[in-house]
């Protein structure tokens, strides 16, 4: 594998690339009213990590050796859906947060109504670009099905509902796993699978990348829980310590910090294990798992 | 044309049919958590008029003479998107309404967070069923593109944003037309066009039904504005007089009640005019236009 700094460079190049795709997608849609577009762009173009977008692109390249425009569209779509979920999650009636990606949250920078609409707009537009920009309807329909299932009421939304419900109640590991799987891991899985679909992967490849994505998502969320305890707002770009304050169910709360780190490591290893049948071209995905794990250290 | 009571029976049969489709779609999704599903079903299954759903079915039957399962799915999808828009529109940060379809609004019956998530869930699920239940990807992708454009940030959401922005400002007919076109007419147009697409209509047929749907939507919204002034809450199943109270831009406010009725009649005639090239099988759509107009009388 390449050195850590090589990987950091590759990740940052991918982030820039995804940012470029996002900007050009928004600017192509000149038919959106300025104030609504501004609210949508505000959070969408704020400095996100773009891990989901990068995963789409890397999984696609892993299968057919080069980037393709279907994966580009899928990367933008999943970042749009992820961003909409952040905007709605930050609303006063939800997590009531005022800091996100180092900036005031959307409803603080604009107002609540505009934040609700901006989120709705990003969610709808994700499906619009998947249906409109991909000229192979079979690929388009598969990508939309994958994304809508991951983001929908039996996926991310179920996780958000359970997350809210779990506040200040005595939860257990089973409930926490349900929340992490639905709220976070299904979207990571969708990112990996959408990359595979955009490159016409075979069922075995799709299955392996689905497993990789799921474990990456679980590991990422455990790392997030750990960082919420250990990091600073300045470093993280969002409010820290808010999980405990809100009485949220997290790994550190349930099993302590050290044990949480053990589980994060185990999960990262499972993600890497899912890539066993891929050659060194999957190294970038393996390094992504290690980098994710390193966030907790 | 058949008698008024014949048409009323046909419309009510279609409403029952759409209600049955909606219930069976929800019950097929056993993987949604009970509380989230309950909030989604609460407004979705409440007694809506199902005009958009009926339009999908009737436009589909007009083209190929019989109903088909693609149109069934499209009818459920558009009712899901319409219902999500009502749930979010009623939120405290938006129109802050407590009565809808004769019941407490979703955020009153549950809470704000659940109403936001239920709306998000219905919107996402609409695309999920269009991608998952229609086995011709070409038809599926076209339906999704039509619906997402109509509902998205250059469609319904733009209309909602403009509607909120127009409160208590001196607006003009041009702004009002923009709001009605985007907030209401584009979804009616989508209903007609989705019906046509599900029946493999040719471009001329699609164009005619798009025009019919657009004029129906404009007429419907003018009728709605008029009813908000003239009707009672009991009769309408939602709060009346709220437009004026909220300082909303409406036809009655801008040009008075009588002139509004003239425009409603003109618009209904334009809708009927768009059907000129269809034979008596389009009578049900013509009668729908007349019925809509009669609401204002």
Image (tube, coloured by chain):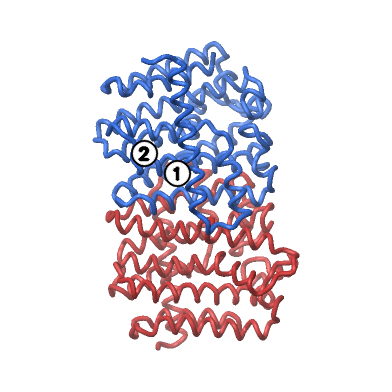
Chain colours: A red, B blue
**Label 1 close to label 2 by CB (< 8 Å):** yes
**Which residue, as the protein is rendered here, is positioned at the far top?**
B258
Which one is nearer the viewer's eye here, B103 or A84? B103
Q: Between disc 1 and disc 2, whose residue precedes? A: 1
Vertical comparison of B101 with B219: above or below: below
| Residue B102 position within the rendered picture, expressed as x and y whole percent measured from the top left | 64, 32
| Residue A269 position within the rendered picture, expressed as x and y whole percent measured from the top left | 50, 85
Q: Residue at 59% of width from left, 43% of height from top?
A: B88
Q: Quadrant of residue A180?
A: bottom right
Q: Quadrant of residue B195?
A: top left
On-image quarter of the N terminus of chain B: top left
Which one is nearer the viewer's eye here, B131 or B69? B69
Chain letter for mark 1, please: B
Vertical comparison of B232 with A296: above or below: above
Residue identifier under label 2: B194
Q: Residue at 54% of width from left, 40% of height from top?
A: B83
Which element is circle 2 on? helix
Chain letter for mark 2, please: B
Residue B77 has which mark? 1
Which element is circle 1 on? helix
């Amino acid at each position: 594998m390449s050195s850590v700094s090589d990987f950091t460079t590759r990740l940052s190049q991918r982030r820039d690339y995804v940012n470029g795709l996002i900007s050009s997608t928004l600017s192509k849609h000149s038919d959106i009213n300025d104030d609504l577009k501004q609210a949508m762009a505000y959070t969408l173009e704020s400095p996100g990590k773009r891990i989901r977008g990068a995963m789409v692109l890397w999984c696609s390249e892993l299968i057919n050796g080069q980037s393709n425009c279907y994966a580009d569209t899928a990367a933008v779509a999943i970042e749009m859906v992820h961003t909409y979920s952040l905007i709605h999650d930050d609303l006063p009636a939800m997590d009531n947060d005022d800091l996100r990606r180092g900036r005031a949250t959307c409803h603080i920078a604009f107002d609540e109504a505009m934040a609700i609409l901006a989120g709705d707009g990003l969610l709808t537009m994700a499906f619009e670009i998947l249906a409109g920009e991909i000229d192979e309807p079979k690929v388009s329909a598969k990508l939309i099905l994958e994304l809508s299932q991951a983001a929908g009421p039996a996926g991310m939304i179920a996780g958000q509902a359970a997350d809210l419900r779990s506040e200040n109640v005595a939860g257990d590991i089973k409930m926490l796993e349900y929340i992490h799987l639905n709220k976070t891991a299904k979207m990571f899985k969708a990112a990996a699978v959408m990359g595979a679909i955009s490159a016409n992967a075979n069922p075995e490849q799709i299955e392996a990348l689905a497993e990789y994505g799921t474990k990456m998502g679980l590991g990422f969320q455990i790392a997030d829980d750990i960082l919420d305890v250990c990091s600073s707002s300045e470093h993280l770009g969002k409010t820290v310590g808010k999980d405990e304050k809100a009485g949220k169910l997290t790994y550190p709360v349930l099993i302590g910090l050290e044990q949480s780190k053990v589980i994060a490591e185990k999960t990262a290893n499972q993600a890497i294990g899912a890539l066993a049948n891929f050659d060194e071209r999957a190294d970038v995905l393996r390094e992504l798992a290690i980098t994710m794990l390193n966030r907790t250290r």
